[in-house]
Amino acid sequence: MGWSPRPPPITRSTASLRLVPHFSHFRFSFHRAQESRGGGGSRRRTLRCCGGTAPAAAAGAAEGRMAAATAADMVWVRVLEDGVFRFDASEAARAAAGPSLSFADPRRREAPHDGADMPAVVPVCEVAAGGSQKVVIKLPPGTSFYGTGEASGPLERTGKRVFTWNTDAWGFGPGTTSLYQSHPWVLAVLPDGKALGVLADTTRRCEIDLRQESTIKFSALSAYPVITFGPFNTPADVMTSLSHAIGTVSMPPKWSLGYHQCRWSYDSSEKVLKVVRTFREKDIPCDVVWMDIDYMDGFRCFTFDSIRFPDPISMVDDLHSIGCKAIWMLDPGIKKEEGYFVYDSGSKSDVWIQKADGSPFVGEVWPGDCVFPDYTSEKTRAWWASLVKDFISIGVDGIWNDMNEPAVFKTTTKTMPESNIHRGDADIGGVQNHSYYHNVYGMLMARSTYKGMEMGNAAKRPFVLTRAGFIGSQRYAATWTGDNLSNWEHLHMSLPMVLQLGLSGQPLSGPDIGGFAGNATPKLFGRWMGVGALFPFSRGHTETGSIDHEPWSFGKECEEVCRLALLRRYRLLPHIYTLFYHSHTKGIPVATPVFFADTQDPELRKVETSFLLGPLLVCASTLPNKGAHEYAHKLPKGIWLSFDFADSHPDLPVLYLQGGAILPVGLPIKHVSEASLEDDLSLIIALNENGKAEGVLFEDAGDGYAFTQGDYLLTYYIAELHSSVVTVKILKSEGSWKRPKRNLKINILLGGGAMISTDGVDGEVIHLTMPSESVVSSLVATSEFEHKKRMEMIQPIPDIEEPSGQEGAELSKIPVDLKSGDWFLKIVPWIGGRIISMAHIPSDSQWLHSRIEINGYEEYSGAEYRSAGCTEEYKVIRRHLEQSGEEESICMEGDIGGGLVLQRQISILKDNPKIVQIDSSIQARSVGAGSGGFSRLVCLRVHPTFTLLHPTEVVVAFTAINGSKQEISPEAGEITFEGDLKPNGEWMLVDKCVGLSLVNRFNPREVSKCFVHWGTGDVNMELWSEERPVSNETPLRICHQYEVQQTT
């Protein structure tokens, strides 16, 4: 009551695995083998495979033993291969742990591996009374963290926290802690460049806490083993070892590595064919078109709309005739409707997920009320696979599994209740509630879909794309990074997100190029296509209601950039396909961070705008006002030579080839089926300091499994410089295929984009005489001059977002960052002056994140929802920066009509930077005299939409003016507090899962009522002023503050 807000003012040897001498300077905890603790020797206890849930008596005894434990070293046993160890909290915890769903063969996690090596570091585990388990691994200072799967934010993960809980995270931001997939995995790169991988092998919600330097913490609610891989010599070695556990990516059909065009939705067969034919007419490469949910009859899976898609077989035949494949969406939500054949057959087979009372769970998704297949049961997976088998008979080339977190509408949690029952098979965990299987639901659906495609056509490799997944999903499906936004921040985030997935075992991924939600601009779309064309999975996609997002939709300059970018991809397909063969056989990611080229260079470990495709370095720009050629890119040590395909452009990435590498490239084709083995092949060669280079090319039929029987050609090329003559030849070949008769063009890079070339025949020895040093210098200088001249002459994609130049316009058109103390805010003055992001830096928590035009923090001028104030353009009237000695703040005002303005000052307090203060008022500026100087009735309504990171663990809590304690959970829906029931100047949003509260303080005299509305994954905590007219002397005002506090 007394509070008053302030006015605004590579090879692993056995020896290297023992690690004691080699790593002694890292001060790892080292433990000798102790037979009594499962650490080796003949008396080591043999692990047993747990088939389903432990009997109640055994489980109770195990829980009792675990509850009595305190923080202690975990017991360990060697598994899988040298350098890999399984750790458990105790022998009882080991017995209580459920089967592995991450391991390709779960038995390998349970079977001891003979050996003499011992762990370099032993985790410490603390088990709480309820059985929850917290594991801590301390590593040497200077260790860098990566992995954590599908995660937004920076590439290097120190300081971040992730919760593995698959979530429909539309419009996620850099601080979102739970996305669509769960990978309880951390890759640690040690100070000397060696690497260690750590897997918390649990399907349950798991906290991965990397906020303490060089420390990994895992927390989950039940017993789980931790598997460590290494330390090994390189991160690539760790990834190979991980692949021996979780499996490698299925070898993709070659056509799936072309470009994919998608939107929600191409709403008819005619529209689909028109789009693909336009690609062909404009000579823009494309291999695949996608059908979103609108092809279905009323969103019923396995059906077709009889008006808009009357003859899907004929449509697919037409697509195939012009070299284009078709991929169709299938969701898990099955419409609950008698007479619908999928619902009827599923009900007859009893395949639906059940509520606790044994009846089928019904939740709303696109078709309305839906039931959900229980993919944890082999019976259900076989039922689904049979539906898929029949479905692909129309010519379906691939299947898109969406909404499979599983997403459920009109629920605060965005998913089904954790109390739902899965009747799982014993070998994956048995009968369990949904909290046990939630994170693997999407993977099990993809597994069923993959199996159905195998059954439908055993001669073809299935292609499945899944939104939700778990570590190991790459065995069945590719993935994309979910419903991103059409803005520069999400363009930038797409690079580290793709790299993180690769470092977590999923090499076949990419973002929605151009952004899914919202409208891209020409420059944003072209720049995104430039880099997106070189991601492992390359697909453009956008949401319903957005403008067209095809490459030709943004003007001729953008169209040309997209054409050049995709022609690059198709020329590089021989190399990309070879990288996928290596990933399939060795588990090495296709796209890797730059530090893979030199793991000992600490400056490379946070590079986010460049990545490697093997020895090919791609350097991009994610800044709208600077092209990649204007960047000072950090290159790894050694020789890196720039090159292009006579296609350099200010809006395309810069390419470098590592010294010592040979890069195979093909012709600039428009779709994969246009190529043949007899086509001309080119080798781009960058000699190393010793005048040598080598490279490899994998070729097969591009589909099917004959390659597993030896029907392929794997060629190892070498180049060597002797006495000014470079000799290029084949070192060796593998596979049963005969070498095709084709021309071979040799291009030797000299530097600065210059090269010398000669022609020959593949399979023959080719010689090329190098020019003298003076000639080389001249060629390099000429190439650099011509490149510079070309870049100056090329018209870059115009930026239609440039401000008009009037006072305040620049700030009003560019998102404003407020960053000081504990807070980082993003504000968009030009649409409602809204706050679209509120990130609390010390706790790494993002309390608010929204798209630009709706939600976030907004304010209204009336009691009506979205009344004036939330959409108008606000003018920035003051902006103060902390760097200038002022308080970090921005003051804006918007004209809300009737002679009124809504003014808002947002500040991070200088004397208490833990606090964000928002001081808002409705002021009369030009109210007519005929009204007596008073305006219409107005009400200042503060409307923040806070993101719920853990919807089932969140409440709104406060002490009311009358002294009563209030705690409002999501089940309350909507509730209003007025009079003595109103909070006494403070209420808080409490996240019990992370032990944090967002405290909102206000002056009760300024607030007439408080309103809570629980939404789907979010909550509104509104402050309402009284409703009355205002005059020059009597504005309406609410000044309030936000602070994050620890909650016990």
Image: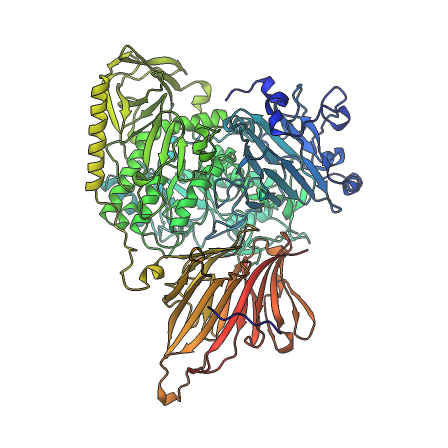
Say if residue 671 shows up in the picture. Answer: no
Q: Quadrant of residue 643?
A: top left
Residue depicted at 57% across the width and 58% down the height: 412
Position in image of residue 591 (x %, y %): 43, 33
- Along the horizontal axis of the image, is 101 left or right of 452? right
Q: Nearer the viewer, residue 291 or 579?
A: 579
Q: Nearer the viewer, residue 681 or 871?
A: 871
Quadrant showing the C terminus: bottom right
- Along the horizontal axis of the image, is 458 left or right of 244? left
Residue 307 to residue 717: above or below: below
Residue 11 to residue 423: above or below: above
Position in image of residue 342 (x %, y %): 52, 48
Residue depicted at 70% across the width and 29% down the height: 76
Name of the residue lying farthest toward the front: 885
Position in image of residue 529 (x %, y %): 33, 42
- Along the horizontal axis of the image, is 188 left or right of 295? right
Q: Tell how many labels.
A: 0
